[in-house]
Image: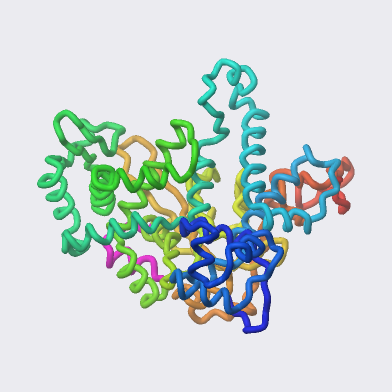
Amino acid sequence: MATDSGKKLFVGPRFRRIRQQLGLSQTQIAEGLGISPSYINLIERNQRPVTAQILLRLAETYDLDLRDLATADEDRFFAELNEIFSDPLFRQIDLPKQELRDLAELCPGVTHSLQRLYAAYTEARRGETLVAAQMADRDEGTRFEANPIERVRDLIEANRNYFPELEQAAENLRDELNASAEELFAALSARLREKHSIVTRIMPVDVMRETLRRFDRHRRQLLISELVDGSGRAFQLALQIGLAECGAAIDAIVNRAGPLDDTPRRLYRITLANYFAAAVMMPYQPFHAAAENLNYDVHVLAQRFNAGFEQVCHRLTTLQRPNARGVPFFLLRVDNAGNVSKRFSSGTFPFSKFGGTCPLWNVHSTFDTPDRLLKQVIELPDGTRYFSIAQMVRRPVAPHPQPQPRFAIGLGCEIRHAAKLVYAAGMDLEKAEGTPIGVNCRLCERENCSQRAEPPITRTLILDENTRRVSSFAFSNAREL
């Protein structure tokens, strides 16, 4: 984040977020920066600017990357608010976009609360919960969580998909094991056996059936199905070690999230254990260095770290260590019906929380070309451009005659970062034509799209029995209020 010595910035909410992430009080950070606590208070309330000198002192004192003060979170919050207030529920409210942007920047906590409230409303409206009837019968200590999966996704995004405690623990473990990628499974198996008295057994599918991994506490055995491939087996062993050795660190992260119901709490713990396992397979420093040196060639990284395509793509979204950041990627995993089962945002890509994805994004085309990696420049209605790659993956193998599970993995970044990727070599990114896509049909206002599944909720549907257009839906140009 470049700035000159005379420039003043009003970034109070972002400054406060960084202070809280550091675990410092206003008095403590004031002492570190050599200014008064009252001045810190005024900065965080946007009543005083942050000068370039203070920014540089902040970066030097706390080893921070100044990009932490960038607007990535505000862009994401604004996209969420824009989606929420496009609902017909708010049709009578004339809310200018600038007010939404101001709310996202100045009150991120309010934005997050609105998103959770709207998620609960959406679930109730669809008949997926019986909130009103059940709330009266619940204990006072029990709170309603509209969607535990979305709740955990929010927590991951709030931490920018980076957990330094787990990164350090994973690096320490790899240093102790001193094993190459090819030797990792054997080393992890020995660790479980020698330190935790847990024996690893690869079991036949007729014994495991639909289960891929199971820890037998009584017999102290970790059972893994023969259907799981080599990289998946190492991952499952690392996950088990994470639960056994990093339970305190995982619980500390979970507790920082505040009160959680049992379901999201358990899901968050499992997610963090998975994070640790990936960090063990692909330790931060060597993985980041390899990614930079190889221009983010996913297939070569997969070979070098003995990992799968999806595992590498997922790991690339976590490279957020201060002063050793990678390209800020976003990731999407969908099945051939368009259901989204995984998504991680770099902070700027506006994933929809309440709908599907755009069919013009070629991540869906990978099912027609299963052995090819596809690349594409995409452009959102606001003109923002991104570069993405996509490939279909199969995991894990299913015994005949069960259908083989297939997923499409989409990995992308803002166009300004694309030059660092091997996949963009030889492309004139400035002149490359972008495929116009939308967040999803219900929010996209592009006209004459042959792939449109429903009209935008912000426009009035026009029905004319005498006309048939390319799109099944025609709508007015005037936005509904």
Identify the residue at the far left of this view: 194
Residue 199: in sight, yes or no?
no
Q: Is residue 199 magenta?
A: no
Image height of 305 relative to 475, above or below: below
**Image location (x, y in percent) of residue 320:** 45, 64
Image height of 378 relative to 460, above or below: below
Nearer the observer, 110 or 453: 110
Q: Is residue 306 magenta?
A: yes
Q: Residue at x 33, y 52 (%)?
A: 276
Colour scheme shown = rainbow
Residue 315: in sight, yes or no?
yes
Over which residues does the magenta segment extend? 296-309
Image height of 355 relative to 17, above or below: above
Number of labelled discs? 0
Left or right for 198, reference 135: left
Nearer the observer, 59 or 262: 59
Quarter of the image holding residue 251? Answer: top left
Left or right for 175, reference 477: left
Image height of 469 relative to 32, above or below: above
Quarter of the image holding residue 435? Answer: bottom right
**Image location (x, y in percent) of residue 113:** 63, 42
Q: Residue at x 75, y 56 (%)?
A: 446
Identify the residue at the far bottom of this view: 5
**Image location (x, y in percent) of residue 163:** 40, 56
**Image location (x, y in percent) of residue 39:** 63, 66
Q: Quadrant of the C terminus?
A: top right
Left or right for 130, reference 243: right
Q: Residue at x 37, y 60 (%)?
A: 312
Q: Quadrant of the N terminus?
A: bottom right
